[in-house]
Image (tube, grey):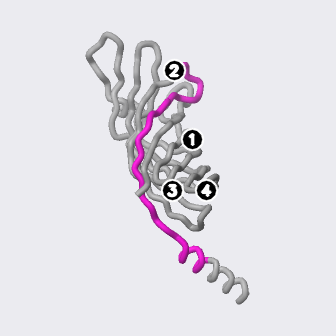
Amino acid sequence: MKKGLIFVLFALVSIVSYSQISWNAKVGMNMSNLTGDVDTDMKIGFNVGVGAEYAFTEMWSVQPSLMFTSKGYKADGVKCNPMYLELPILAAARFAIADNQNIVVKAGPYFAFGVAGKYKYDGVDEKDDVFGDDGWKRFDAGLGVGVAYEINKFFIDLSGEFGLTKIADGDGAPKNMNFSIGVGYKF
């Protein structure tokens, strides 16, 4: 028991003594749609935000971010544009491929809260609120996966998000699905 406790303490001390925090800013383009039994088309959107990276070792880290992102869909003359504040918390593994160049593979949960959004109808000036009384649920959560290519302090990021919560009641059990490509800079 004592040997196990001493081992755990040494492991924690070595992790804490190495750990480093870095910050980054990101901007990108989203391609979003709904999953479930719904007939919708992909919509182009955007994402912008800031993130942190807490490195445990040279290889392993946790990457939380705070993003402002647009999701939604297009279907039959209707464009749905919900916007979310999103918190992805991804575990990451970094693989060095050359001097100051890395491939980063990451995965983990995301949590989002709907803050704004409108339905736009072709040929109609009126717009309805996406998160109104009979609209979408504001809370969204799911799984995120991604890969990034780092060159010095710049990075290019490809990621996907697969919603696990129903965003609306009714037929089809729709869930968010989002793919994005982005660029960023690490401070």
Task: Report, in whole angstroms, how far the alpha carbon at label 4 lies from the one at label 2.
Answer: 35 Å
Task: Report, in whole angstroms, how far the alpha carbon at label 2 lies from the one at label 3.
Answer: 31 Å
Q: Look at 42% across and 31% down and name the residue there.
A: 45
Query: Of residues 86 and 151, which is closer to you in this image?
Result: 151
Q: Note whether 94 is above or below 119 in the view shown.
A: below
Q: Earlier in the sequence, mark 4 or mark 3?
A: 3
List the single residue furthest toward the left: 125
The residue where tag 4 is placed is 94
The residue where tag 2 is placed is 41
Range covered by the magenta-colored residues = 12-41
List the single residue furthest toward the bottom: 2
Query: Of residues 63 and 117, which is closer to you in this image?
Result: 63
Between tags 2 and 3, which lies in front?
A: 3
Disc 1 crowd, CA 10 A, few/some/many (<14, 14-19, 20+): some
Between tags 4 and 3, which lies in front?
A: 4
Secondary element under disc 4, as helix, strand or loop, is strand
The numbered disc on residue 132 is: none
Query: Of residues 121 and 102, which is closer to you in this image?
Result: 102
Disc 4 crowd, CA 10 A, few/some/many (<14, 14-19, 20+): many
What type is the residue that disc 2 sits on? Answer: Asp
The numbered disc on residue 63 is: 3
Could you tell me if the residues under marks 2 and 3 are in contact, i.e. CB atoms within 8 Å?
Answer: no
Between tags 2 and 1, which lies in front?
A: 2
**27 in the magenta segment:** yes
Between tags 4 and 1, which lies in front?
A: 4
Q: Look at 55% across and 41% down and name the residue there.
A: 159
Q: Earlier in the sequence, mark 2 or mark 3?
A: 2
Secondary element under disc 3, as helix, strand or loop, is strand
The residue where tag 1 is placed is 164
Q: Earlier in the sequence, mark 2 or mark 1?
A: 2
Could you tell me if the residues under marks 4 and 1 are in contact, i.e. CB atoms within 8 Å?
Answer: no
What type is the residue that disc 4 sits on? Answer: Arg
